[in-house]
Amino acid sequence: MASIAIDTGERAGSLRWRFTLAIFAGSFLLFLVQPMLARMALPRLGGAPAVWNSAMLVYQALLLAGYAYAHVLARLPGRTQALIHLGVLVLAALTLPLGLSDGVPGAQANSFLWVPWLLLLSVGPLFFVISAQAPLLQRWFAISGGGDPYPLYAASNFGSLLGLLAYPLALEPLMGVGNQSWWWSLGYAAMALLVGWCMMAVRGSARSLALPEEQAPAERLPLRRILTWILLAAMPSGLMLSTTLHLTTDIAAMPLLWVVPLAIYLLSFTVAFAERRTLAAVCARLAPFSVLLICIGLFRAQGSLLLPLMAVSLLNLFLVAVALHARMFDDRPPASQLTAFYLAMSMGGVLGGLFCALIAPLIFDWTYEHPILLLAAGILVAGSHPLRILERAWRHPRLERIVLLLLAVLALALIGWQPLFGEQPGWLRGMLLGATVALTIVAIGKKPLFAMGLAALLTAMGGFQKLALTAEPGKMTRSYFGVYSIHEGPSARYLQHGTTMHGLQLRGSAERERTRTSYYAPGSAVGQVLQAAPQLYGPAARIGAVGLGTGTLSCYARPGQRWTYYEIDPVVVEIARDPERFTFLSRCLPDVPVVLGDARLSLAQQARGSKDVLVIDAFTSDAVPMHLLTREAFALYRRVLRPDGLLLVHISNRHLNLEPVVAAAARQGYHALVGNHEPSASEVADGASPSRWIVLSPSRERLEQVRAVTDPGFWESLRPTPGFAGWTDDYGSILPILKR
């Protein structure tokens, strides 16, 4: 008997390693393909945060389809399951190697719909079949006598986490996307062999192809229980996407940040589904406090609070996700209903993604989905008070009414004081905020009261100002590429994209409204070159500008010059052409043509040598449109320029040093100068901002002429960075150019 037990244990251990390896490999490949496909899409879609959210929606939808397939397949005999899944693996392999489907959106195409469709066509079959493997192999593991299959889901998510991180940290810096695709194809083949190995275990098992509990009629899962699973899964999924958008739109528009919330989301499953429950329990107790903390600082992402708030946002995502996923794990059904459990989980993930990626951008003019999801998360994690003394205090029958009354009074005082009585004294506001925070902590055990406290803090700490902008027509607009808000100062109006100023216009007179401001001031590199354009190219200079902004550059135009703007976002065009918002275009170039669509695609349609000057200033917030800075892009610019034309590239960026990128691209027949503008006090008073531009030309003589007709002492030589090869459409990494 002891020998039989040992043999059984050894077999279970062997099976666990076999199935763990297969599940790990599938999950690793699954999440390796996500950033890989996003990288492939850069030349066509750019680097807006919404592209990543669209990709996540597609992946979640395919994950749902895969889980549904696994759920249906699990009802069939084991041999049939194996044969069908093997056939689907082979059919999906026919779409290898990975690549982006052909197709170019029209100027009027809805990116919220078109981008997910493109990604679905590109990766659909492969993602579908691999996504089914985690639940399917877990069930096969249980059938084969391996024991409890649910902890294998932790291995699945650990593989997903490593795959996600491996791409930006290891794979992308080492090889181009073409080689990445072929190596991924080899990984797919290896994974298929591992799945076949697991199939052999199922077919060779002496056990029935049904679990013991399935041999008796199974109880139907209550609808309420299924809906609870869906809700608990939807909340972390939505919060992961809203946190991503919040970080990259409202705090720091760094493409590298996009993978961090997803990595934390995946890590939460590993903790929540672990056999040891201590860490999950600790996270559940801390989650209400993290939600409270982030609600206090949500609208204060500036200055010294920037990095701490980023850290708190990510910590909150982790704690909430672990708390809610752990509740799902604790309520898991028997292994016979495993696929139904994962199907409900996947359905929740899709609903969370659908809300953030499609519904919210269409109905909200700001990222309101984030505070909404924070409030909802606060309600879900506030089931009981983590402090026992306060839990006992709630037994007093009148305490709930007292706290409700006090919270209502404090909320009215915080929100309504300023409109009624003017600015609050600092000491009074501090006391009111402190009292509201204290009462909200007390209310953690009572969900309605806790939500009320969170809502009061969100509104008082900046939410009211956002709502005021929303209430005023034309002040805030949301597009696929970000959130634009218009702010009024005492002497200027400025356009903000995320946390980055996108344009500034002085007010007070027609003369002031024509003043060239921000990065485009007369003393900047672009300002000096455009003022000198008549001397360089005569009165009929042909000038193109990639990136419209508020249209500031148009006020450098002179009679006879032919200007063309290239802009990807129709909302930006709408804002710039509306004289009720900004008047640069209406006063300086009212009839200037604006070509809608991706600039590379639009410039590819231009005749050779059709531009004398071409300005590249297409960054959205601080996100980098990588495809505009590759060697292929600079080759296109050279074709569009006349042989002695000028290319001006704006490289001001808070997070990335773009100079080595441009220097590497300039090796293809360009000569270059760098212009770094640090405005004087008088220039700052006229709206000037520091800026850094690179001026390039195929003609060395033309650059010398630029020196002669501008400030000669202004220019520096462009020095390449040793060992940095630059970016191509096939290869690029931001890691070497991150500012330390």
Image: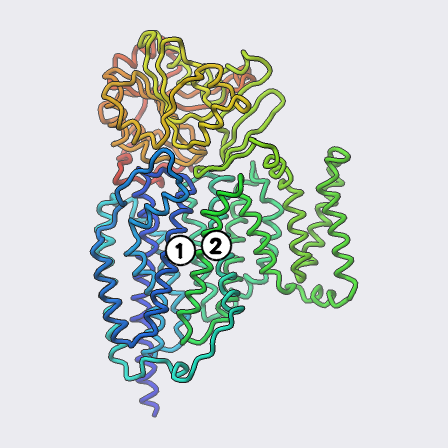
Q: How many marks?
A: 2
Q: Residues within 10 Å of mark 1 (few under 14, many from 20)?
A: many
Q: Residue at x 34, y 54 (%)?
A: 31
Q: Which residue is identified by label 2?
A: 352
Ranked by sequence position, the earlier of labels 2 and 1 is: 1
Residue 597, image quadrant: top left
Of 432 and 203, nearer the camera is 203
Q: Amino acid at mark 1?
A: Gln
Q: Amino acid at mark 2?
A: Gly
Q: Residue furthest front?
A: 108
Q: Residue at x 32, y 53 (%)?
A: 32
Q: What's the distance in space between the residues labelled 2 and 1, CA to CA?
A: 9 Å
Residue 564, image quadrant: top left
Residue 619, image quadrant: top left
Of 672 and 572, nearer the camera is 572
Position of 551 relative to 348 (above/below): above
Residue 60: mark: 1
In the image, 402: left or right of 302? right
In the image, 472: left or right of 189? right
Q: Residue at x 42, y 69 (%)?
A: 340
Q: Secondary structure at mark 1?
A: helix
The answer to the question of whether label 2 and label 1 lie on touching residues, with beta carbons closer than 8 A, is yes
**Residue 255: where, in percent of width, then height?**
40, 41
In the image, 113: left or right of 442? left
State which quarter of the image contains the C terminus. top left
Q: Residues within 10 Å of mark 2 (few under 14, many from 20)?
A: many
Position of 14 relative to 507 (above/below): below
Q: Secondary structure at mark 2?
A: helix
**Residue 508: where, in percent of width, then height?**
60, 15
**Residue 543: where, in percent of width, then height?**
34, 17
